């Protein structure tokens, strides 16, 4: 072998390997569906088709703590009045409140480990759906509840429904940044939720839904996270209500036209009623949304931190009111940011 050929191979082989790795990167397209009644309207169905959506993450039910019976109970159980469009992979999602884990006894955890797969199976059968390839558990666990949550996940994996199914779990930003404190859940995949990252109740917060600078501060170690991480971005908005400096709640109002200042705030000058809510003089609202510019900036940051070649980018969530704020071409640009 000539010296020139050796040099050529030395230079070209790493390039070929890099290209092979780059070509192997796949980003699937997904949406969350977070309503208790599954009934797609024409705009929602068209969006799924136009964006070539592959996965639909459907919330099957919540598990909440009933203070009267002092037991965990399913609430907001899914009702389906229309079929899932052909070609879409369905992923059942179960949301478990952290309050449930805080109050649950070991016997409660054991019971949940059996009742959750039982209810999922019943809903699959009721609505004529096949065994899913993936089931997702959504919970914002804390250092104080992680042992009970992780035990629950371990018990779920022993059941017949989960035994040959990918178990994915949602991962909050703080759980990636402070992994030593929050731990690694015993699951097959994680879903990094890149939204709801600010202090909603702090009057000084600019946008608690999504902020690229804040996101960048949390995902520095995401590429080293030991579970493959899918990623989710928001496409929703809301109004945050304050009375002086005290948080009053969220206002969900479609096409609410109010004059905003440079800080995206509206101040109530006189007592008034909006959507049945009574606002007093001096109350103010902070408008928060998921602008396309911010989403694209966030996607660029997230792409650099992907820790697996095969991931899903999920938008939260599929609803005609949310989709009305975006053009299909813009959502296509967002998904395409993760393409090679």
Image (cartoon, rainbow, N blue to C red):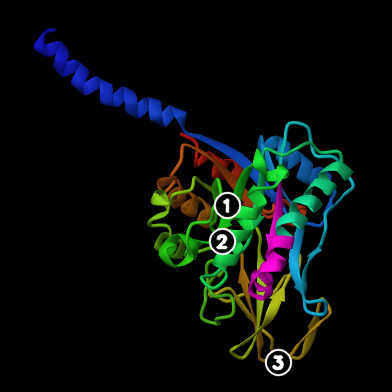
Residue at the (44%, 45%) spot, across then down: 306
Distance of label 3 from label 1 (alpha carbons): 38 Å
Residue situated in front as seen by the camera: 322 or 232: 232
Can you identify the residue that label 2 sits on?
195
The residue nearer to you, when weighing 26 against 101, is 101
Contact between labelled residues 2 and 3, with CB atoms less than 8 Å apart: no
Residue 326 appears in the picture as rendered: no
- Give how far across and how far down residue 27 sits, in percent: 54, 37
Name the outermost residue toward the left. Answer: 3
Of the pair 330 and 240, the residue shown nearer to us? 240
Count the labels in the image. 3
Please say if the residues under marks 3 and 1 sit with CB atoms less than 8 Å apart. no
Q: Residues within 10 Å of mark 3 (few under 14, many from 20)?
A: few
Q: Is residue 45 visible?
A: yes
- What is the span of residues highlighted in magenta in the rendered image? 91-111
Would you say 185 lies left or right of 303 here? right
Q: Residue at x 82, y 76 (%)?
A: 69
Badge 1: residue crowd in 10 Å (few <14, some 14–19, many ≥20): many
In the rendered structure, does residue 93 fall within the stretch colored magenta?
yes
Q: Which mark is residue 232?
A: 1
Q: Point out which mark residue 281 bears.
A: 3
Q: Quadrant of residue 218?
A: bottom left
Q: Are marks 2 and 1 in contact (CB under 8 Å)?
A: yes
Q: Is residue 247 above or below residue 110?
A: below
**Which secondary structure, mark 1?**
strand
Q: CA distance from mark 2 to mark 1?
A: 8 Å
**SS for tag 3?**
loop
Q: Could you tell which of marks 2 and 1 lies nearer the N-terminus?
A: 2
Under circle 2, the secondary element is loop
Residue ID at (56%, 70%): 208
Q: In this rendering, which labeled residue sits more in front, label 3 or label 1? A: 1
Extreme-front residue of the structure = 107
């Amino acid at each position: 072998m000539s010296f020139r050929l050796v040099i050529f191979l030395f230079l070209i082989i790493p390039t070929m390997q890099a290209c092979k790795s780059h070509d192997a990167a796949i980003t699937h397209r997904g949406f969350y569906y977070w309503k208790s009644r599954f009934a797609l309207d024409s705009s929602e169905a068209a969006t799924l088709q136009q964006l070539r959506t592959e996965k639909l993450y459907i919330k099957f039910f919540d598990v909440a703590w009933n203070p009267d019976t002092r037991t965990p109970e399913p609430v907001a159980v899914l009702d389906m009045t229309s079929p899932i469009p052909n070609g879409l992979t369905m992923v059942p999602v179960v949301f478990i409140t952290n309050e449930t884990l805080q109050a649950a006894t070991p016997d409660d955890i054991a019971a949940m480990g059996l009742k959750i797969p039982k209810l999922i199976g019943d809903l699959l059968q009721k609505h004529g759906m096949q065994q899913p390839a993936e089931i997702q558990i959504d919970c914002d666990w804390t250092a104080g509840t992680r042992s009970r949550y992780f035990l629950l996940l371990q018990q779920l994996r022993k059941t017949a429904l989960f035994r040959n199914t990918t178990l994915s779990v949602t991962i909050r930003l703080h759980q990636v940044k402070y992994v030593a404190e929050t731990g690694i859940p015993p699951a097959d995949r994680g879903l990094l939720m890149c939204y709801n990252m600010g202090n909603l109740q702090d009057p000084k917060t600019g946008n608690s839904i999504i902020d690229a600078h804040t996101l960048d501060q949390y995902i520095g170690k995401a590429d080293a996270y030991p579970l493959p991480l899918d990623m989710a971005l928001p496409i929703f908005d809301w109004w945050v209500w304050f009375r002086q400096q005290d948080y009053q709640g969220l206002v969900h109002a479609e096409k609410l036209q109010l004059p905003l200042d440079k800080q995206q705030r509206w101040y109530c000058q006189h007592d008034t009623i909006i959507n049945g809510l009574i606002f007093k003089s001096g109350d103010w609202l902070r408008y928060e949304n998921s602008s396309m510019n911010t989403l694209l900036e966030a996607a660029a940051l997230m792409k650099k931190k992907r820790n697996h070649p095969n991931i899903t980018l999920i938008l939260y969530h599929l609803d005609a009111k949310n989709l009305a704020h975006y053009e299909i071409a813009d959502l296509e640009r967002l998904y395409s940011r993760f393409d090679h």
